[in-house]
């Protein structure tokens, strides 16, 4: 679990660096962040958007603006939080449903103990043999207070869940 957690960290840092390289790197703070690197991390968590960096709209940085927009646009099939469930890999074991701390907190007597969810607020539930997502905005990886949670990723035996 520790190794997987570190791997996630490394992967996210690499992505933040990739984004940072395309930013103006002037730390002008117009986006409300103290550094361009902080802005890169905010783009990753979807707290801010590419449009929140005004210098990127200048003519000389137009190409970078385009590249960043492509990088940040969620891949096809990704939910609002960047989560992708590869349905062809999911066999409905329910590990992720029980591992998700949001599920457990919202539904301690249902999803939290491996039973069918009794709450509408859960993020992950198994239906018709495949995991389904809802309330993705509640995912701990989403928004300005995001945490690099990886409960669902590391408990999936088939690597059916990933985040972009
Ligand atoms: S507005 Fe753009 S250039 Fe200025 S600090 Fe934010 S990311 Fe960097
Ligand atoms: S990343 Fe964490 S909070 Fe988000 S769905 Fe997975 S286990 Fe739940
Ligand atoms: S842990 Fe993986 S295989 Fe099991 S239900 Fe979740 S996504 Fe599907």
Image (cartoon, rainbow, N blue to C red):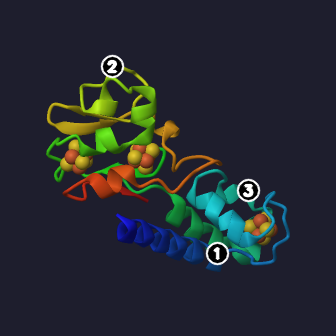
* Residue that mark 2 sits on: 118
- For the N terminus, the quadrant is bottom left
* Residue that mark 1 sits on: 20
Q: Secondary structure at mark 2?
A: loop
Q: Which residue sits at x=43%, y=59%?
A: 164
* Residue that mark 3 sits on: 52
Figure check: 102 above or below 75: above
Query: CB at mark 3 closer than 8 A to ligand 1?
Result: yes
Q: Earlier in the sequence, mark 2 or mark 1?
A: 1
Q: Which residue sits at x=33%, y=19%?
A: 118
Figure check: 61 above or below 80: below
Q: Is residue 122 left or right of residue 117?
A: right
Q: How many marks?
A: 3
Q: Secondary structure at mark 3?
A: helix
Q: Earlier in the sequence, mark 2 or mark 3?
A: 3
Q: Nearer the viewer, mark 2 or mark 1?
A: 2
Badge 1: residue crowd in 10 Å (few <14, some 14–19, many ≥20): many
């Amino acid at each position: 679990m520790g190794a997987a957690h570190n791997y996630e960290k490394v992967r996210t840092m690499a992505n933040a660096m990739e984004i940072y390289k395309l930013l103006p790197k002037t730390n002008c703070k117009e986006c409300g962040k103290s550094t361009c690197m902080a802005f890169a991390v905010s783009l990753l968590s979807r707290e801010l958007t590419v449009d929140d960096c005004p210098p990127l709209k200048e003519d000389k940085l137009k190409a970078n603006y385009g590249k960043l927009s492509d990088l940040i646009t969620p891949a096809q099939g990704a939910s609002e939080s960047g989560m992708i469930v590869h349905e062809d890999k999911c066999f409905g074991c329910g590990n992720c449903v029980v591992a998700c701390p949001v599920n457990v907190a919202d539904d301690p007597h249902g999803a939290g103990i491996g039973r069918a969810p009794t709450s509408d607020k859960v993020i992950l539930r198994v239906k018709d043999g495949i995991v389904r997502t809802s309330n993705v905005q509640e995912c701990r990886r989403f928004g300005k207070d995001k945490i690099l949670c990886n409960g669902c990723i590391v408990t999936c035996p088939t690597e059916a869940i990933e985040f972009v």
